[in-house]
Amino acid sequence: MEHNEPPDFPGSAIGSGMDLLAELSSPWTTARAITAPGLTRQLLAHEQGFAVLSPEHLTAVANTLTFLFQHTKVWSLLWAESVAGPATFRDTRTVRWGVGVEKSRELARTAGLKVEAEGDVWVAKASAELSAEWSKLTQSTVRIDVETETTRELEFDVPAGGMDIALWQLESRLTRRLVLRPRRHLPPEPLPHWVETAIATPVRSIVMPVNLTRSTTRTPVDA
């Protein structure tokens, strides 16, 4: 499967495998990058369990651990249906993309940005800053839009044998996890308490629907 297109319908018969369609979509990584010790220390200073460490210990941890930022994408199935024919199929579907206030604040906290305002106006002003910061952290192009809703018009000429129709939407997934820095090792036993804190640090993952949809169809082989 090409990543720029959603997965094909499973099987060949109309209506077959429709319940499996969503499971055929797998995420792929577009970029991943680790943080330098200075930025790692800055991010750790806001994490529960690390903020209480002395500056010297925090620096030592930042030289041992790093944050891995990852940008993945995946096609998400919005809707799928088998339509009997012959007929003309028409439908209107609502599509949402972008992020609202809560996700914007989560994106800011995860990236180590200060959040000093709230509301839709702040989201609109912060979207460019968030896009730039996450593009830098992941070393990829990340576009963070304000949450928007629109409609998608679908129209197909359905042959006598019927047609399977699916509507997909692209999603960006931004993830941050704490990992061991390359070519570094944990201190010898007895392990310091921050090792347990590091293991317990949750992975942060934010899913953002993108303003990109694709409709796919399947018709009988002899149609």
Image (spheres, helix red, strand yellow):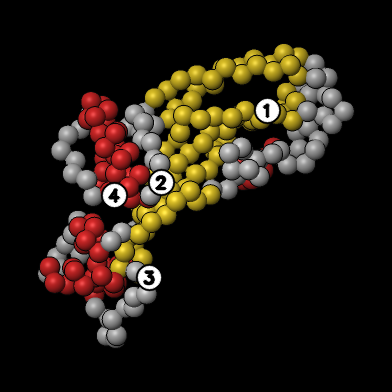
Instruction: Give the image location of residue 182, x and y in percent.
Output: 37, 70
Quarter of the rendering containing residue 56: bottom left
- Under mark 4, the amino acid is Thr
Camera-side mark, 1 or 4: 4
Residue 196, relative to residue 96: is it above or below? below
Alpha carbon separation for disc pair 2 and 1: 32 Å
Camera-side mark, 4 or 3: 3
In front of the other: 195 or 213: 213
The residue beneath circle 3 is 182
Alpha carbon separation for disc pair 4 and 2: 17 Å
Camera-side mark, 2 or 1: 2
The residue beneath circle 1 is 165
Name the secondary structure under disc 2: loop
In front of the other: 149 or 15: 149
Name the secondary structure under disc 4: helix
Alpha carbon separation for disc pair 2 and 3: 21 Å
Q: Is residue 78 visible?
A: no
Q: Residue at x 32, y 78 (%)?
A: 186
- Under mark 1, the amino acid is Ile
* Circle on res. 110: 4
Q: Are marks 4 and 3 in contact (CB under 8 Å)?
A: no
- Under mark 2, the amino acid is Ser
